[in-house]
Amino acid sequence: MYPKNAWYVACTPDEIAEKPLGRQICGEKIVFYRGAEGQVVALEDFCPHRGAPLSLGYVENGNLICGYHGLEMGCEGKTVSMPGQRVRGFPGIRAFAAVERYGFIWVWTGDQALADPATIHHLEWAENPDWAYGGGLFHINCDYRLMIDNLMDLTHETYVHTSSIGQKEIDEAPPVTKVEGDEVITSRHMENIMAPPFWRMALRGNGLADDVPVDRWQICRFNPPSHVMIEVGVAHAGHGGYEAPAEVKAASIVVDFITPESETSIWYFWGMARSFKPEDQALTDSIREGQGKIFSEDLEMLERQQRNLLWQPERQLLKLNIDAGGVQSRRIIDRLLAEEQALAAQKIDVRQVG
Amino acid sequence: MYPKNAWYVACTPDEIAEKPLGRQICGEKIVFYRGAEGQVVALEDFCPHRGAPLSLGYVENGNLICGYHGLEMGCEGKTVSMPGQRVRGFPGIRAFAAVERYGFIWVWTGDQALADPATIHHLEWAENPDWAYGGGLFHINCDYRLMIDNLMDLTHETYVHTSSIGQKEIDEAPPVTKVEGDEVITSRHMENIMAPPFWRMALRGNGLADDVPVDRWQICRFNPPSHVMIEVGVAHAGHGGYEAPAEVKAASIVVDFITPESETSIWYFWGMARSFKPEDQALTDSIREGQGKIFSEDLEMLERQQRNLLWQPERQLLKLNIDAGGVQSRRIIDRLLAEEQALAAQKIDVRQVG
Amino acid sequence: MYPKNAWYVACTPDEIAEKPLGRQICGEKIVFYRGAEGQVVALEDFCPHRGAPLSLGYVENGNLICGYHGLEMGCEGKTVSMPGQRVRGFPGIRAFAAVERYGFIWVWTGDQALADPATIHHLEWAENPDWAYGGGLFHINCDYRLMIDNLMDLTHETYVHTSSIGQKEIDEAPPVTKVEGDEVITSRHMENIMAPPFWRMALRGNGLADDVPVDRWQICRFNPPSHVMIEVGVAHAGHGGYEAPAEVKAASIVVDFITPESETSIWYFWGMARSFKPEDQALTDSIREGQGKIFSEDLEMLERQQRNLLWQPERQLLKLNIDAGGVQSRRIIDRLLAEEQALAAQKIDVRQVG
C-alpha cells in the first residue's frame, strides 16, 4: 500500500537522454521520454494497438513511435497517426503528470485531476549554486516503508556501516522525534567525539583538521509520500555543533527519494548535497563513490528483512523510541492512504448519483 | 489454449541423434528417440516405476532404458522388461504419434485415435532438390498466437528489423487478407523500390545487380495449428514481380513452425527455403546466420508484449486491416478449439451411455 | 510432510566457525552460532525488534548481536540488552534444542519439551579412532523421501553411477528387506564378481590386489526421521564376504543425513566412514572427492523426478521388491507423522479443558 496521489521521483534526466525509459512505479508500467519542447512526458507503457511496450520504440518530432508497428503516440496519450490507418477512434492510453525539477523527473501516478506541481517539496540545495549534489539509484526488493524506517533510525549506522559512518556514540545519544504537520523530524546530537572515517574524509575535503574532537548531528526529515532528507555533519567541538560557523564544519544533506515499484520493491534514489566546495567535482565524485559503497551495505539487510516479514506476516514488531521516526512516518502515510480511499469512494458515489 | 489434435513440429533429427530428447509440447512432457528401425518414438517422459524422466536414460536395441533403475520401455509405452522384475502388470505410459518428414519430427499431442500422418501439410520445398533449406530454433516466452500475429503482419519489419529487411515502403503498401478454407493469406506487393540490405545480399548471392529498383512481395500463409509460410522475394523492377522469371529474381519461403510449450511459451522453428543456388551451402549458411540475427530482434518485443498483456488481461486490443491476418488465423484456431472440445464432450457422453 | 519431533543434522562445525549461520530447516528459519561456553545455540532467525535476520549479525561474549540495530539476543531467545533500551518486555523468539555430536550439529525443530539428546542415534564410527570420516553437503530441490528411496534402492547405481560403483551384478542380486522396530534394512550380496572402479581404488588404498574376484555387499539401514547408513564393501572372494577378516577386505559405511529444508528441498549431508587406514588423510580426501563426484550424479535425476511428480501429482508409482526399503521407510515416517499430529491435537485438548 502506497499513496498514489503524490509526486514520486521517477528517474533522472540522463536516463531518458538517449531513448525512452520504461519503468514500473506504484504498480503502473510507465514510459518516460521528452516531447517536442523538451518537456518530460509519462504515458502508460502499453501501445493501444497490440499491447507492445512503447518504451521499446523511439521518439520522432516529440512523439513516441511504437517500435513494433509504428503507431505514433502523442504526449496526451492519444494516437496521432499510424501508417495507413485512420486513428481517430483509437482508444487512448493514460498520461501521467510529469515534471522535471531539481534535477529529477517527478511523476504523479494517482488521480490526475489532483496533480499540482506546486505541491512538489521545495529543495533549496538543488537550486542554490552554493550547493553541489551527487547521487545514484538502487533497485531493492523491499517494501518502501522498510527503507523509511531505515533512514529515520540511524542507530543502524553503528552496525551496518561500522567502517565508515557508524560509531558507538550514535547508540548512546537518544534521538528526539517530533511531528510538525506532515513532517516527521528525528534529531540526534553527539558532542565531543572523534569523527568516523567518512567524516574525517569530509573534514579533510573541506580543508579542516580531522584528528580533533567534533560535535556531530543527524536531523532526519520525513515528508510524504516517502522522501527523507537528513541534515548531517560534524563541526570542530565547542563551536556550536549544528549551529557552528561554516569554516569549522563539514555539513551536508543526505537525500533519499524512495519510489515504490511494487508492494515489495523500490527504486531508491540516494545522494548527498553539500554546501562546502560546491565547485569541486572531484570531491563530488569521491563522496558519491563513498556513499554508494556505504548505502549498498543496507541492501542485503533490507531484502532479507523483507523475506523474514513475508515468512512471518502475523508477527508484531517492536516500536521503540528509536523507531519513533518510522512509526510517525507510517502514521502519516496511513492517514494519506485513508484520505485517498475516502476520496476515491466519494468519486464513485458522485458518479452513481450523477 | 492451443489445439491438441494437430501435428506440431517437435524437434529436428539432429536433436535426437546422440541421445533421447525431453521436451514439453502443448503442456505434455515428452521424450523423443529412435526405435529399432530408426523410426521416431514419442512417449510420455515419465517412468512408470518411480516417475523419473525417461529422457535421462539411453536407447538400447531400440528401446528406452530408464537411467534411474533400468526399466526398459517399449515404443508403445509398455514396459518390456526390468532387471529382476515381472513387468506384465506395469501400467503403461502414453505414446504419442510421431512422424519424421520434411526434415522435422512431428508429434500429435491430442486424441491419438485421430492422428493421421496424411494430414501433415505438404511442403514442396522440403522434398524438391531444386530447393535448399536452413533454419534454427528459438525458445520464446510468449503465447504462440503472438508469434502468429507477428508473422501475419509484416509491417513490423519496418520497425523491428530496420537495418535488414525493414523499409518504409512496407507500411505504405496496404496488405490484402483472404481466407481460403483453413488457410489465411495476407499479401503485400511493393513496386519499383530499392531493396533493403538483406535482399541486396540475396540478389548478389544469386548473381544479380543489387543497385537497381526492384519489385518486392510478401505472401504470408497461415495454416493451422500454427504454421506460417511466407513467400518473399524481389525481382528487378518491371519484369512481373512475383510472376517474374527466375533469372531476374531472388525469392524464398520464410518457414515458421510455432509449437506451444505452455500457455505462455513456445518452441519457434524458423528457417528459409530458397529455389536459387540450392547447392551453395555457404550461401545457405550465410542466409541462416543473417536470418537468425534478424529473427532474434523479435524476441524482446514478444516477451515484453506478453508481460504487458498479463499485466492488463482485460484490455481490448485493436484489430486493424494490418491485423487481419492474425485475426483471421485466431478465428480458425478458435473454431478448431471449439470442435476439439465438442468432440471430447461427445466421447464422454458415449462412454457414459455405454 | 516431515516429522518435526526429531533430530536432524543442521550443519557442520566449520559452518559456524567464522560467523553465525542462517539456514532453513523443516520450514523454520534458524540461526546457529556458538554461545559463551562454546555450546551450539539455535534460535529463530528473526530479531524481535524489526524482524531482521539475526544471522546477519555477530557474536559477542556468547550472545548474538543483531546486525541492524544492535539488539543483544541471549541463548534462550530472550533479549539481553539493547543500546539505550529497557528490554524486559521484549517478546522472546523461539529457541531450538541443538546438540553438537559426532562431528555434526543436530537440531530439534518440533515440540521443544520432547527434545532429548539421548535419542540421537549412536554413531560408532564417529567416536572410534579406528574409523575415519570425510563428507560434504549438497542442496537438492526434491522431497526428502525421494532421497530416501534413492538410497534404499541401490539398483540405481548400475544406471546413475555406471563408471564408478555401478555394475550389472547389482541388478541381478535381489535385495532382502526387513523391518526391525523403527529400522528398515535392505541387504544385497554379490559373490565372485569383479569390483567396479571405485572399489578397485579402495582395495588398492588398503594395499590389496584389485584384479581378483571379490564378494561385494550393500546393507542399507534407514532410521527415522531420515538417516540412511549403508554398510558397503568388497572382500577377496571366498573369505566370507561381509564376514571376511579385515585384511582381505575394503569396507566402509556410506553416511547420509537428509534434512528437509522445505516440502521440496533438502540439505543432503553425505559422507563415508571407513575402518581401514583411518590415519591416511590423503586417502580420506581422495575418497571424499570420488564420492562427491559420484553423488552429484544423482542431483539432476532427483530434481527432475521431483518436477515430474509435481507435474503428475495424481499418478500412482510402483512399489516393487527393490522399492521395499523406501516403501517401508515411508511407512515408518507416516506412523511418526500420525503420532505427531495426535500428540499435537491432544495438547490442544488439554489446553482447552484446562
Image (spheres, coloured by chain):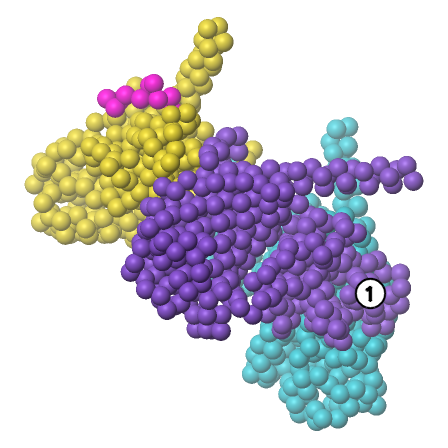
Chain colours: A yellow, B purple, C cyan
Quadrant containing the C terminus of chain B is: top right
Question: Farthest residue in the right direction?
Answer: B354
- Report the span colored magenta: A110-119
Dot 1: element: strand
Q: Foreground: B259 or B176?
A: B176
Which residue is tagged 1?
B79
Q: Quadrant of residue A92?
A: top left
Quadrant containing the N terminus of chain B is: top right
Residue drawn at point x = 40 percent, y = 67 percent: B206
A152 magenta-colored: no
Q: Chain of mark 1?
A: B
What predominant SS class does the magenta segment belong to? helix
- Residue A26: percent from left, percent from top: 41, 32
Q: Foreground: A39 or B11?
A: B11
* A37 sits left or right of C259 in the view: left
* B135 sits left or right of C196 in the view: left
Q: Foreground: B68 or C126?
A: B68
- Residue B287: percent from left, percent from top: 43, 65
Residue drawn at point x = 82 percent, y = 88 percent: C192
Q: Is residue C326 visible?
A: no
